[in-house]
Image (spheres, rainbow, N blue to C red):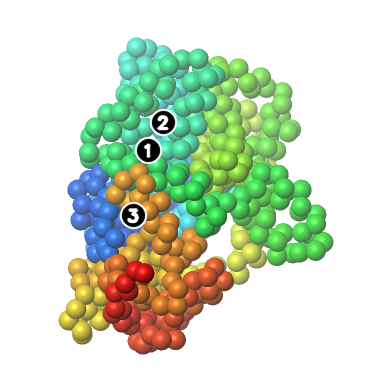
Amino acid sequence: MEHVVYILILVIVTVAIRYPFSLGSSTDTFAHLFFIKLSRKNRLGRHRVYQALNDGYSAYPNFHHYLISKLSRGNDENSGRALVLLWDVLTVVLVYSLLAFSTYFPPYVGVIAALLATTSPALLPFTARVKSIGARTFGLFLTTLLYLSWYCVLWPGSQTMFVVGVCSSAILSITIVASSQFAMQNLVFATLWFSIFAQTWMLPLSVIGGLVIGWFVPQTGIREFVVHFKINHYIRYFSDAHLGTTASNRTFVSDFVKLPVYLLREKGALFRSLSRTSILYLLLAAIPFFWLWLASEGWRFQLWPLLPDTFLFHLIAVGVVAALLTSLPVLRFLGQAERYLEFVVPAAALLVASTFSNIEYALGLVAANVFFAGINLALIRKDSPNSSNTSLANDIIECAVFVESLSIDRNREVNTLVVPTKMAYAFASLIDNENVKFYYPNVATGITGFQDMADERVWLHIPKADGDLSYWSEKYGVNTLVLDSKTEKIANEKGADYGVENLEKLASFGDLTVYSVPEYEVRETE
């Protein structure tokens, strides 16, 4: 009964501090709804896009989207939100159980570990992690299970435990790659780390063996993901970084050094640096309870040798080193560095809770988590005071209804170019009509597919245009333009001119305007 009460309290706390933020609107939510829609139309593991002007594969890891599509009962968004919260709840309960059900610790130690984990700022970025119904919380849960299986491989209590650990490692590796690209990249870092320091081939063999099996099983989607998405993603970063990337502004040291200058001269840059780009600050603020413990008590322990007692520390080291390495310019193509710190949290919470000196000290570490989480939220709100996307989401919904009506009223295909192109996912998630088609970003038919699309944009998600839309009309049959006014300003700065003054304006919805695009005569080459 004691365990039931503790688990119930932890579930309530975990849900209570996430649920309000999960209700917020995010344009990323529409993208995930689009992939859920694809999962429902495709077979498991397939990624071909529908309603597409540029036919091909949008091979984003989709197993989590597939789960939502199967579990949903008519409302994909609410089902996705419920699953996102569920995975964090299960991770927190797993952290509790590993200590509370052991023979070495009383249950309250498991409660401390779970509280440290659930309140950690790394798991409370208050943005896309719990808002966009993506697979980040699922990736953390799978990775925590994976690390548990690795412990069984490295220090098995029996032959049966060893076999279970190897098989679980292979199965979880497949599921991670099929579900979450950040969890996949963390898997690569962790496998390399333990191959070096554990001096055993069983871990990499279990991972590689699982992925080889997954490669030849179409239902995993691993082959399409690697060929049509991940290789393209890496190639595009190195060849087209000058056209803008979401990770290119992350800094390793320079922003941290400049903080005093920002404080005195440029407050806006200070808030932006602390909330988005200064990885050293983000590293400190993501898991403050661990750094405080390390500075006050952790230094007394022998942490480095790879023994059962120090396994947790190596799991922490993997995430910290990955975050630092991916802040370097040469490795920024691996994404936002601070996200790797999410995978550190369960191990850090278990390590700290199993060694703290007294209950007051442990609760002080929980309070430190809450304090830094509050600071992070304040920084995000200060840097993006209009960060709520509720109005934009409503505009997109109204605009999508209008765009679909054009197909019905005019009895023809509506071939739509949306600017920014990333917003096409939002429209496609809302319109289930084969007569309404879109030009999608990140669609490929091979390992150079993204590169082939590079000539069609002047900046990230901003298509090219030289005074008119003749290129798009001739190549893709575009007859409708949906233009976001804020993106239009950026496009003009980057040299793209859509010639909207010569287009028929059909309707406006907030910052979104719908234009009719005429048929252009095919221009003869000189």
Q: Which mark is residue 503?
A: none
Question: In the rendered structure, which disc, 1 or 3, sits on the residue that comes first in sequence?
Answer: 1
Residue 284, relative to residue 77: is it above or below?
above
Do the numbered discs 2 and 1 sit on residues whose CB atoms are within 8 Å?
yes
Q: Nearer the viewer, mark 3 or mark 2?
A: 3
Residue 451 image point, x, y percent: 41, 51
Judging by the rendered image, the residue that carries numbered circle 3 is: 443
The residue that appears at 28% across and 33% down in the rendered structure is: 215
The residue that appears at 49% across and 20% down in the rendered structure is: 195
- Nearer-the-camera pick, 53 or 195: 53
Q: Nearer the viewer, mark 1 or mark 3?
A: 3
Residue 19 image point, x, y percent: 46, 58
* Circle 1 residues within 10 Å: few <14, some 14–19, many ≥20: many
Q: What's the amino acid at mark 3?
A: Val
Judging by the rendered image, the residue that carries numbered circle 2 is: 146
Q: Is residue 71 visible?
A: no
The residue that appears at 53% across and 52% down in the rendered structure is: 241
Question: In the rendered structure, which disc, 3 or 2, sits on the residue that comes first in sequence?
Answer: 2
Quarter where residue 422 is shown: bottom left
Residue 248, relative to residue 102: is it above or below?
below
Q: What's the amino acid at mark 1?
A: Ile
Say whether residue 174 is left or right of residue 513: left
The answer for how far apart the CA atoms under marks 2 and 1 are is 9 Å
Q: Residue furthest right?
A: 264
Do the numbered discs 3 and 2 sit on residues whose CB atoms are within 8 Å?
no
Judging by the rendered image, the residue that carries numbered circle 1 is: 176
Question: In the rendered structure, which disc, 2 or 1, sits on the residue that comes first in sequence?
Answer: 2
Residue 62 image point, x, y percent: 32, 48
Residue 86 image point, x, y percent: 39, 48
Q: How many marks?
A: 3
